[in-house]
Image (cartoon, coloured by chain):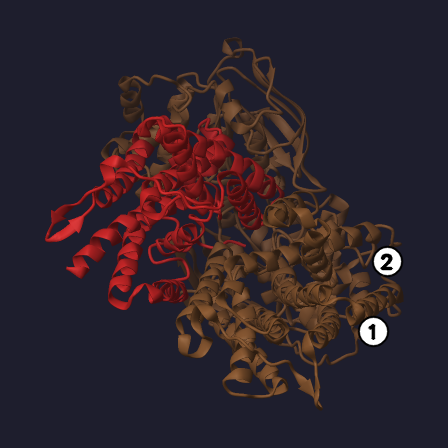
Chain colours: A red, B brown
Amino acid sequence: MLITSALISGLGLGSMYGLLALGFYVTYAVSSTVNFAQGSSMMLGAVFAYTFAVTLGWPFWSAAMLALALCALYGVIVEWIAVRPFVRRGSNAWLMATVALGIVADNLVLFTFGKEPRGFVLPWATGSTQVLGVGVSPLQAVIPAIGLGLAAAMHLVSRRTRLGSALLAVVQNPDAARLVGINVPVAISAAFAVSTVFAGAAGILIAPLFNVHSDMGTVFGLKAFAVAILGGITSAWGVMLAGLLFGVVEALTTSLLGSAYTQIVTFSLVIVALAIAPNGIFGRAAVKKV
Amino acid sequence: MRLAPFFALAALFAAALAFTAVANSYYVFVMATLALMAITGMGLNVLLGLTGQVSFGHVAFYALGAYGVAVLTTAAKMSFWVALPLAVLLAALTGALLALPALRVRGPYLAMVTIAFGFIVEHVAVEWRGVTGGQNGIMGIPSPAWFGYSFGERGVALAAIMVAAAVLLGCWRLSNSNWGAAMRAVKDSETAAEAIGLNPVAVKTVAFTLSAACAGLAGALFAPLSGFVTPSTFTFSQSILFVLVVVIGGAGTVTGPLAGAALVVLLPEVLAGLAEYRLLFFGALLLAVLWIAPEGVVGEIARFLGRRRAAAPPRPEREAPPVRPASAVALRVEDLTIAFGGVKAATGVAFSATPASVTSLIGPNGAGKTTVLNMLGGFYRPDAGTIRLGEQALERLPAWRIARAGLARTYQTSQLFGSLSVLDNLVIAQARGRLGRAALPREEREARAEALLAFVGYRADMHARASDLPHVDRRHVEIARALATSPSVLLLDEPAAGLAREDKQRLARLLRRIADAGLAVVLVEHDMSVVMGISDHVVVLDAGTPIARGAPAAVQEDPAVKKAYLGEDHGRPVAHRVASGDLGDNLLDVLALRAGYGAEPVLKGIDFDVRGREMVAVLGANGAGKSTLMRALSGLHRPVQGAIAFDGADLSRLPAHKVVAHGIVLVPEGRQVFPELSVLDNLKLGAFLRKQVPAEEIERMLERFPRLRERLHQRAGLLSGGEQQMLAIARGLMAKPRLLLLDEPSLGLAPQVINDLFAALDRLRAEEATILLVDQMAGLALALADRAYVIDGGAIVASGSAAQIAAAGALEKAYLGAV
């Protein structure tokens, strides 16, 4: 019973890690850079949604859509401010710059939103049904469904739409992409927007479970980064799979050993995994040239 | 060493001590915090600033030091003076252990490992209640005592300041030592560091351990200072603050972390009312520093002051070439073979390089010459074959061991240690990787470096930063640095690339002198005048296999060599396809086009034109500028000077995606398909800018290139070379170009495939497409083209109808050098 319940919640959280990690994958594949403070994007999604849905009382779905639109805008801002100037210079400082921008965002929210965590209650998400003898809340079913659904949508979009093809082309061969008329800098900004939308969506989905506050994204984002790296940060399906695995392992550790050891075990596994496979479990090393 | 900063710092520390001795307990705590931040920051600077490795988890070592002292002085009742070194040792050992997995990875991966470690330590502190006291931590940590005198908070603060001064001194000595230079070298170019005999893993591990020890030391002092330790002090954001201290102050400078710590600790005191906002402020400050002043406060000041220093050219006492090979051994290469993912880059390469000789490796583009050098230098491990230097087998050794055995090399793009001065580049190379006690005192090493610089002809400032040097000087300094390791063999990869004529001749004479001094010189070079002028022995590679070897004159006459470079002479009559009256107006007009990388332009003022419905060939040897020309026309290479007039519009300032919109489409060198997409998707992407693509067009394209039809839904990366080339051309045609540019379409293709390819181009010609073709297969290109230009050294040296160019000797001269 305990295992089943752990599996279910693990899949749910794991799909959220996977969503955030997909965001890392998209930007890394297109530009070899990431928004290291992806957790802040997740937090912003939840905060925006809360502000529109609870503070202003708008209907949930319009609040969520507007929140995601603002997240997309934030993604473009991150790329313009914290990534592009450094890539242009050929420097790696984007790693620290995105962290700095994340700190700024977290603290701005802290001072406007307040220090108190706010509960985000969704009326349709309360109550529970029995599945395999275990009590499951609707949210625990909806989260993995939406998470995997978004991942599948991304897969479809990338193959059926013009923007999707453009992003795929830039990932596989940036020069050739330019030569068919694709505007690569715009594609990179779009990739960052997509990644923050995913993060924001994950934030909105877990807000009812974890409460909304300015710090909610930090650890989540770091774990998602670990997931992205383990999944090989060069493979979209690897990343999603790694997310699900990570979530399940975390949930199982919590139910078997108690929540105390969860962080220790999961982060130790990350270090061990990277020691064994420096390019991630699913990734491939590029051929070096000199 | 300049004395002024030394005295200023001494005065600063004295003032700090005096202030702490009399201030009230609040300010005592502030000063102590400043000192501890500075100590941690200086340690992290060794890792982040000197060695260039990022760590977001250093709070873990700080915690280890603090908890170490706390546990040992309370539970184990040890004296502080015993507990301190033990705690520091704990932090250092943990750092060394973590370095093992951490340093196999780099960049974001390394950041992840350090973050994970930070979290692990924080949570272990919470969970291991028996030892660490859990969330409540450990209280009542006794103050250190010395002969009955209890330090108290003030005493610890004073001690911390003195320790900070000691650490500063240590960091200053490290920065100026061999180890410091080695760390900077590894940061600037790990490849070049290995090539001078440094073991990057060892260097990075030492840096990691030192930085962990410093953080541990600061933590060990923190414990008695605050009297208690709890896990809530050692959070992730503390690690970020440490990074902040280093970056704001100036990563890589000695006093930077001191300034950074002062800013981070004192600024909130000054802006007391805004203390709540300090994290927000620091985040914004970090961003601002990264944008505007990436070298940090101290770094920018140092750079500003550095500009005023007078230049110091080398002035050696000796004039004789100071090159002495360690021992006279020959390099023997046998049956060297390597394949990358199914593509054979080199097969059965064999040659000998004897002392006091120049052996040149030549061959057309893609022949595998740099791959061979990379195998010799240890950058790649060959799949088969042996490399012997005298008696020693090198083929399985890592690059740094090969360098220590006496093999030195230079690179196609110079890999100097940019942040070191020219002189320091050579001084660190002399150590040949052994960083312990130097064999010679520093003055002697510097004198030897000066003599080497003079020998290679470097006449500019010795203390200039290597990254500021112009192209020619970079080449010379790189050669001098290679010589500084006292090698027996010197490998050079296209050293003449990008040099003007006189500089090339000077370089050739230099290489000859190096060989005459007793070294075995192995040279990969495109410029035939250099190669033929100084070589004793020439080896010709084509598609990875040796096809000829011998004295330069013999190789020049070898028909196999000529065929490899110039292609088959098909003997077909070259006929004008199009009568002049049928030609369109000038479609493309290029005027005074200049383009280049760095100081020396690759294209030095090209004028040519292409008329509608014409096929024009551009021929020339490698390094002549053909590819640069194509990249410049297509918009991939920007900026360029001059004009590219296409049907009335000047495209010289437009980026590639806008050039495509005007109707110029480039089929780039090396096919460049989208490997994970299907053939069909590749074709559709070709029409990216066109809104509607009727299915009949794709059908017509498949009729033109029938081989693609069978593979329509396969991943493009799995196609053969020839099929990929067809696909790339088809993709280009899908955009309905008004001018099609083809860059080396025959490269790497089998002869039969090349014939099919040129047949397809012939059909395009017949359909009155306008084509500009660059190819090494000069014979075939001339058989198809109406007109041709020959480029040599970035300028057009011959132009005319295809028949005229085929007849004259201009081609052979350009490709193989004057006979």
In the depicted structure, whether residue B79 falls above or below residue A204 = below
- Residue on which the image places disc 1: B443
Q: Residue furthest top?
A: B581
Q: How many marks?
A: 2
Q: Is residue B445 visible?
A: yes
- Residue on which the image places disc 2: B313
Q: Is residue B674 visible?
A: no
Q: Chain of mark 1?
A: B
Taking the spot 89% from the left edge, 54% from the top edge, the residue there is B310
Label 2 vs label 1, nearer the camera: 1
Question: Residue A101: horizontal and vertical position, in percent?
Answer: 55, 44
Q: Are marks 2 and 1 in contact (CB under 8 Å)?
A: no
Q: Chain of mark 2?
A: B
Q: Between residues B766 and A136, which one lies in front from this camera angle?
A: A136
Taking the spot 37% from the left edge, 62% from the top edge, the residue there is A263
Q: Between residues A135 and A230, which one lies in front from this camera angle?
A: A135
Q: Between residues B512 and B92, which one lies in front from this camera angle?
A: B92
The secondary structure type at the circle numbered 2 is loop
